[in-house]
Image (cartoon, rainbow, N blue to C red):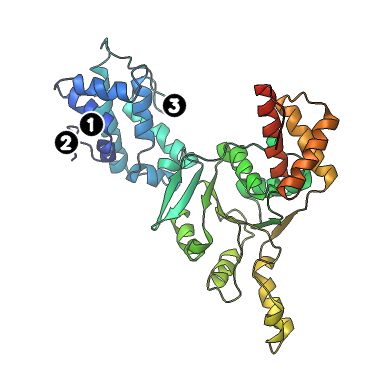
């Protein structure tokens, strides 16, 4: 059992953690030097119990998975889990007066007095509300090798950083609130020119509603055929998942088209579904069409209807329009204000227009890049050059 001295029945996964193994070894009466070394390497010597509680909380086991399904674990499973906690908590108490580190206090939902039975009762409710394992703390996942792998470095962007496009953000936000509230919602297609903020808006919504139970599963278009498997993987999870397909476009005869159509069918639900499909695209009609398709078809209208049928299956389509001069300069001005840029606005806007010309067009992305450049130059006390 990975050289772990604790006789754990449910929480065996903890024995894969080097800090936990060193703790267990030291608690058994062996030399504590290895434990101290691992403790200091993990920089948790000021509040060890906090780290230990988090290891327990995030462990993927039969107890946490059962609770996350909304089921009450059997008496046998509850007893076994509680006994594991009792063994661990008893070991913690042996370090209470150790002068080499601070044990600290238990974090919620654990009982502050390290009562194993009370902590078990608290965790039943916690897992039912927050999911289990990495779903509790990770905002985003990707689908790899039949499993959902955590993405730890997600974009920190907020809705306040995304300027203008008020109506677009409102439509998307309202639909996500419906989704989280168990109300009828729609799968979404966000389309428009590059750099208009489609993907950034999705990530900002994730940051806004993470605490309300929203998570994202990023899916490449090559893995679209896995949508049914992903639904199955999260079907018992109490959290809500956006399956996010960025920059989507498909050929007419791509076998992924039919799979995505099937995934979009019945998307408006009364709260029984915890998966929403969101795609971004530079084109309104995701399936590429050409004049040759129409010319070579016996029934060209039928051929066109088939090509448009995929995008039509998205219940909500939001267009991020091209950024004209007025909108572009408005975004530049707001970003500059946020950063505390002091440059005269006439000069700022003149440079912003030249930046757009040099970079090949106006967009929120271009505006942000320019505002970042001006801010950096002001901080360094140098002229803006490009």
Q: Is residue 369 left or right of residue 250?
A: right
Q: Secondary structure at mark 1?
A: helix
Residue tagged 2: 3
Query: Is residue 361 visible from the viewing direction of this image?
Result: yes
Residue tagged 1: 21
* Disc 2/disc 3 C-alpha distance (Å): 29 Å
Residue 261 image offset from top left, x and y in percent:
59, 69
> CB of mark 2 within 8 Å of CB of mark 3?
no
**Which one is nearer the viewer's eye here, 341 or 185?**
341
- Tell me which numbered mark, 3 or 1, is placed earlier along the sequence: 1
**Residue 150 is drawn in which quadrant?**
top left
Identify the image quadrant of the C terminus.
top right
**Residue 189 is drawn in which quadrant?**
bottom right
Q: Which mark is residue 215?
A: none
**Residue 55 is drawn in which quadrant?**
top left
Q: Residues within 10 Å of mark 3 (few under 14, many from 20)?
A: some
Q: Secondary structure at mark 3?
A: loop
Q: Secondary structure at mark 2?
A: loop
Q: Nearer the viewer, mark 2 or mark 3?
A: 2
Residue tagged 3: 108
Looking at the image, the residue that sits furthest to the left is 30
> CB of mark 3 within 8 Å of CB of mark 1?
no
Vertical side of 257 occupied by 142: above or below: above
* Disc 2/disc 1 C-alpha distance (Å): 7 Å
Residue 166 image offset from top left, x and y in percent:
77, 43
- Tell me which numbered mark, 2 or 3, is placed earlier along the sequence: 2
Residue 60 image offset from top left, x and y in percent:
35, 43
Identify the image quadrant of the N terminus.
top left
């Amino acid at each position: 059992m990975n050289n772990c001295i604790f006789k754990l029945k449910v929480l065996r996964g903890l024995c894969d953690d080097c800090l936990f193994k060193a703790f267990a070894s030291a608690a058994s009466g062996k030399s504590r030097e290895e434990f101290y070394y691992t403790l200091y390497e993990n920089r948790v010597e000021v509040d060890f119990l906090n780290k230990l509680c988090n290891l327990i909380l995030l462990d993927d086991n039969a107890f946490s998975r059962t609770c996350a399904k909304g089921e009450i674990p059997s008496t046998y499973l509850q007893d076994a889990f509680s006994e594991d906690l009792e063994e661990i908590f008893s070991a913690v108490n042996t370090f209470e007066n150790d002068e080499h580190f601070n044990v600290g206090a238990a974090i919620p939902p654990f009982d502050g007095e390290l009562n194993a039975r009370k902590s078990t009762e608290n965790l039943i409710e916690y897992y039912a509300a927050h999911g289990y394992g990495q779903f509790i703390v990770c905002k985003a996942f990707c689908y790899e090798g039949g499993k959902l792998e955590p993405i730890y470095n997600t974009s920190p962007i907020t809705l306040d950083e995304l300027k203008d496009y008020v109506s677009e953000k409102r439509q998307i936000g309202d639909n996500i609130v419906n989704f989280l509230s168990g109300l009828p919602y729609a799968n979404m297609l966000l389309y428009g020119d590059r750099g208009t903020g489609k993907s950034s808006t999705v990530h900002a919504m994730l940051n806004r509603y993470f605490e309300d139970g929203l998570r994202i599963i990023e899916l490449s278009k090559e893995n679209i055929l896995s949508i049914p498997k992903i639904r199955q993987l999260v079907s018992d999870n109490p959290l809500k998942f956006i399956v996010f397909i960025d920059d989507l476009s498909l050929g007419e005869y791509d076998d992924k088209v039919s799979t995505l159509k099937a995934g979009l069918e019945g998307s408006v639900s009364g709260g029984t579904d915890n998966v929403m499909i969101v795609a971004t695209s530079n084109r309104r009609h995701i399936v590429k069409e050409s004049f040759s398709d129409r010319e070579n078809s016996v029934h060209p209208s039928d051929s066109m209807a088939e090509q448009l049928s995929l995008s039509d299956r998205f219940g909500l389509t939001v267009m991020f329009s091209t950024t004209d001069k007025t909108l572009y300069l408005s975004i530049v001005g707001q970003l500059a204000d946020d950063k505390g840029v002091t440059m005269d606005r006439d000069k700022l806007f003149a440079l912003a227009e030249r930046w757009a010309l040099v970079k090949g067009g106006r967009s929120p992305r271009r505006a942000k890049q320019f505002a970042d450049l001006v801010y950096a130059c002001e901080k360094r006390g140098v002229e803006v050059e490009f």
